[in-house]
Amino acid sequence: MNIIFLGPPGAGKGTQAQRICDALGIPQISTGDILRKAIKDATPTGLKAKAYVEAGKLVPDDVLIDIIKDRLAMEDCKKGYILDGFPRTVPQAEALEGIAKIDCVVELEVDDENLIRRLSGRRVCLNCGATYHVSMLGDRTTCEKCGETLIQRKDDAPETVLNRLNVYHEQTAPLIKFYESRKLLKKFDGMQGMEEVYQSIMDTLGALA
Ligand code: ADP
Ligand code: ADP
Ligand code: ZN
């Protein structure tokens, strides 16, 4: 199955996508992770993307469409995948229609107040993409999966978070109607606990398979 995860920053897309991909044995394609790695390695794409990502703005569509075209052409995508963080604009969604057939769009709904709390306490592993929240880390400072030191993303700073929420409401939220009209959208209450959200999504995907 080819699945899109849609929702504002902090909704839990990465957390759920990672777990569901492990369960289904399909790759998680996180454009945020791909861009952060490119920035860290200072590749041509990384150099183009850096200022946008750090300001909480969207990287231009043509850059993202090229990244996704290359990634979806890889062998491991033949059995399905979860797109986590793509598409984020209507032009990206239109380009995707020319590249892939999507089976389901999972939308996670969380209010802005909760998003701000989640993003301000988020800690991430740049090595494997795992995501944590300070409230569950205690005095742990390293990744449970790979041992790398956890960091706070620069774009999770309070001013940038507000910027990203505005960008979401203006540029990405229109995709809800876009996928509703194609009868692909499934909505989930992302304010439930991680386990409840996971179960609801798995139930829905199970019924589609
Ligand atoms: P979050 O998990 O908080 O929603 P991501 O890790 O998905 O954030 O994305 C981080 C940043 O990477 C975005 O703020 C944006 O600058 C860039 N980015 C990621 N995906 C896209 C995309 N599809 N289009 C444009 N920019 C993107
Ligand atoms: P996204 O990829 O949509 O930006 P993440 O998966 O990175 O979101 O989650 C953002 C933050 O919220 C992380 O710190 C994560 O641990 C936490 N989080 C994720 N899901 C939940 C949930 N259901 N309840 C409470 N906190 C959550
Ligand atoms: Zn890790």
Image (cartoon, helix red, strand yellow):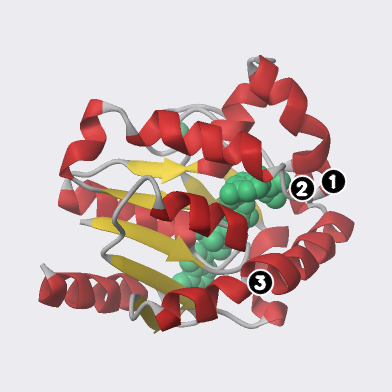
The residue carrying mark 2 is 155
Circles 2 and 1, Cβ within 8 Å, touching? The answer is yes
Question: Which residue is located at x 23 percent, y 32 percent?
Answer: 76
As helix, strand or loop, the secondary structure at mark 3 comes to helix
Return the disc, 2 or 1, that comes first in the chain's sequence.
1
Q: Is residue 101 left or right of residue 140?
A: left
Q: Within 8 Å of ligand 1, the CB of disc 1?
A: yes
> Which tag is nearer the camera, tag 2 or tag 1?
1
As helix, strand or loop, the secondary structure at mark 2 comes to helix
The residue carrying mark 1 is 55
Outermost residue, right side: 159
Within the image, what quadrant is residue 37 found in? top right
Q: Quadrant of ligand 3?
A: top left
Return the disc, 2 or 3, that comes first in the chain's sequence.
3
Rendered position, 26 above or below 169? above
**Residue 37 appears anywhere in the view:** yes
Circles 2 and 3, Cβ within 8 Å, touching? The answer is no
Q: Residue 143 location, x and y as percent?
A: 47, 36
Q: Amino acid at mark 2?
A: Asp
Q: Within 8 Å of ligand 1, the CB of disc 2?
A: yes
The quadrant the N terminus occupies is bottom left
The residue carrying mark 3 is 115
Q: Amino acid at mark 1?
A: Ala
Within the image, what quadrant is residue 104 found in? bottom left
Tell me the number on the disc at residue 164.
none
Q: CA distance from mark 2 to mark 1?
A: 7 Å
> Which tag is nearer the camera, tag 3 or tag 1?
1
